[in-house]
Image: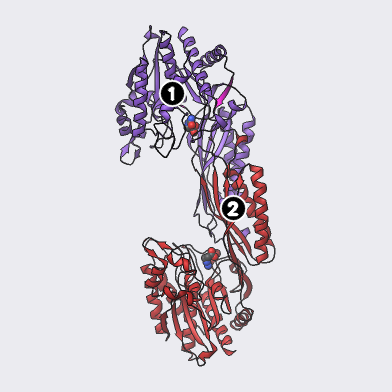
Chain colours: A purple, B red
Amino acid sequence: AVNASRIAEDIVALAEITEPGHPWTRRAFSPLFLEGRTYLEARMKAAGLETRIDAAGNLIGRRTGRKPWLGTIMLGSHSDTVPDGGRFDGIVGVIAALEVARALSDQSIELEHDLEIVDFLAEEVSIFGVSCIGSRGMTGQLPEAWLSRVNGDLDLAGGIAQVGGEPGVLQQQKRPDIAAFLELHIEQGPVLEAERKDIGIVTAIAGITRIEITVEGRADHAGTTPMDRRADALVAASQLVLDIRNAAAELAKMPGHFAATVGEFRIEPNAANVVPSKVVLLIDGRAEIRADMEAFCRWLDGHVEKLATAYGVTIATPKRVSDNQPTPGDAGLLSALEAACERVGAKHRRMASGAGHDTAWIAKVAPAAMIFVPCRGGRSHCADEWADNDDIALGAAVLFEAVREMDKD
Amino acid sequence: AVNASRIAEDIVALAEITEPGHPWTRRAFSPLFLEGRTYLEARMKAAGLETRIDAAGNLIGRRTGRKPWLGTIMLGSHSDTVPDGGRFDGIVGVIAALEVARALSDQSIELEHDLEIVDFLAEEVSIFGVSCIGSRGMTGQLPEAWLSRVNGDLDLAGGIAQVGGEPGVLQQQKRPDIAAFLELHIEQGPVLEAERKDIGIVTAIAGITRIEITVEGRADHAGTTPMDRRADALVAASQLVLDIRNAAAELAKMPGHFAATVGEFRIEPNAANVVPSKVVLLIDGRAEIRADMEAFCRWLDGHVEKLATAYGVTIATPKRVSDNQPTPGDAGLLSALEAACERVGAKHRRMASGAGHDTAWIAKVAPAAMIFVPCRGGRSHCADEWADNDDIALGAAVLFEAVREMDKD
Ligand SMILES: NC(=O)NCCC(=O)O
Ligand SMILES: NC(=O)NCCC(=O)O
């Protein structure tokens, strides 16, 4: 039903809208981002969609159904990228959604429901330090305090206004009309490719918990202080990094996706001849099953106490700087997606999303689910991120079938 | 023989010449440094010394002996500090040396040898990134290339000229007249205090070897990449930090001072949700016995290969970015210092210096040795560095006796 070369053409066109010298960068709130949207809007219009920017700065293409009182079927993802990111993360979900609208049009299919194709604003961590601005904002979940976060002379309210949104009314946003939301995204992991599956049916989006730990030792002269009289914060923190990795690997062996990563790590004073006095590190934890995260945090709280004693350093209770619950996919939509896979002959498996997505925010107010398409080596957020166009087109076909199915109800 | 309150008065006066808000900072090449030298020069003159700045920018106070052809007995240390450093590191050695000259004068003692009291320029790592500028420069050991190292608009040549030196003639500097050099310094370690000794007779200044290691893994998405499919550079580097510490602790148990410290450590990309792709770390190794350092480096070269395989990362052969041999103290001077300790009733022990000192550079061209006085908790290079005045005065008395002894020969 869908047209693979039309999908390829759009993905290539969007990829070319990149910062020169930094492929493939199209940061939210940049002039390039608006250039990308100009292209997208033209394509939406060409597909017969009526376009608008909502209060949260999302670009929406709308197609009216025969029974608008049934509500809106919404499809979409995001067109912004991380710095030096890829050509597929986000944009494939917008283009696949657009292709569903085009395929319906090609086949002169009128839906019962209204259909909306959405390019959510700033899904990636933005210049304001926060992410999923459009999906939170559309559903009244953008914390008001965030609007005054600044980057240079611009605050987030100003940024939303610049793309055509209306920041002043965001707290009142509600979308009670959403009957169902679906997002297609690259997996950003290696599982589908390794198992030669075409489609991942996302059972849940893992909760993300960020935990900050500060290890305090004592700055001593590296030349003169005997090895057995040190309180070396780096040595203690190194043990902690290994223990975190091992604990996470154990939890990952049990049912349900689990991962924990020390991604930020800095030492003080970071001087060649001074025993490190301090390490501040940040753990990024992901859990499909909330109880796993609670177990991890309980283990961690007790473990740092033991480590502190063993290494003669001080470690304050780990601090959860942010903490989100896992988001299960809507059971009905998961079945519809599986049925759609069967109809188009796509090999599929259920799996969790370790990454956060706009779907997690829409799921708070409406039935929502997502599907993954494979990406090479599981690589994402980098210039060599790659997804085969045939895989993307097959995913679009699954969306098409699922929309047809959902529209029947 | 020496006057403890005169020593205290000078140490307090110098401490007060500090950056306001950053006690106790008197950085080489700063206006405050020159203010300190103005004070020192006045005190040298008051002690009857003839003052000059040599080509390397060292402040020297000279007292002519009866038989100048016997050469010069030189005493000294440095008046510069690290940022937010202490009131004792360096300056106590200059003041103790000055006090020896004053005590000789008080007692109307004329020496056979000429006597020089030296404040070496920039012993600490300076704004030009290098240390021991005065002691290297005095003895023709300052690499010519260093003269063009810059800090802002100033190069090292300009810095030396600003304090009154003559950078153009440094390569020709020689001091064949030095008959003996002695330096008094705070221990910067906890051993003398713990063993209730008054004086450390420094058998050797440990060689300093700096080794850079780069661990390269793969940047993957922290949310989606399964724990068992990662090449986490931070995890591998953490294991390396622990192994380095354990290897160093083993070597430290054997005769001869040994220490190894990872003091610099930075990770890339240092982003919360990205598996770390790279760690660059710097080891500061200290060995009294050269063979220990060679053994450590051999172990390290082999070990990183094993670690790289075990953790699926790449670790290039560790790179020695600088490498100095240990410097033994002159045997004759060590005996003279011990005899001097006995005469003044100072409890003494032989020990190595884990820290580098100007003495190491003078020792390359002349008989040289140093003594340590205790410092509280072994702390140095920090605002709470402390040495008791009675200990410093006892050290000055040891210098006085040693000078008398050396002058006899
Ligand atoms: N999909 C995606 O990469 N989201 C960024 C947030 C995260 O999961 O770390
Ligand atoms: N004495 C002293 O602290 N020197 C600085 C060089 C070093 O040993 O690290």
Answer with mark 1 or mark 2, whichever residue precedes in sequence.
Answer: 1
Residue B69, image x, y percentages: 53, 90
In depth, the one of B398 and B197 nearer the eye is B398
The reply to whether label 1 and label 2 mark residues of one chain is yes
Residue depicted at x 56% and y 70%? B374
Residue B292 circle label:
none
The kind of residue tagged 1 is Glu
- Residue kind at label 2, given as amino acid type: Gly
Q: Nearer the viewer, residue A358 or B36?
A: A358
Q: Residue at x 54, y 53 (%)?
A: A217
**Going by the image, does B303 lie left or right of A161?**
right
- Check the image and report above or below for A352 versus B165: above
Task: For label 2, count other residues whose C-alpha is less than 10 Å away and answer few (under 14), some (14-19) or many (20+).
Answer: some
Quadrant of residue B182 within the rendered picture: bottom right
Return the mark for residue A9: 1
Give the percent coordinates (x, y) of residue B147: 44, 67
* Residues rendered magenta in the picture: A347-358
Decide: is B100 above or below A130.
below
Q: Is residue A173 visible?
A: no
Q: SS at mark 1? A: helix
- Decide if ligand 2 comes within 8 Å of the CB at mark 2: no
Magenta-drawn stretch contains A251: no
Q: Position of residue A105 (x, y in %)?
A: 40, 11
Check residue A354 for magenta coloring. yes
Q: Residue furthest bottom?
A: B66
- Nearer mark to the viewer, of 1 and 2: 1
Q: Which residue in the protein does label 2 denote?
A: A312
As drawn, A308 above or below B90: above
Q: Residue furthest right?
A: B254
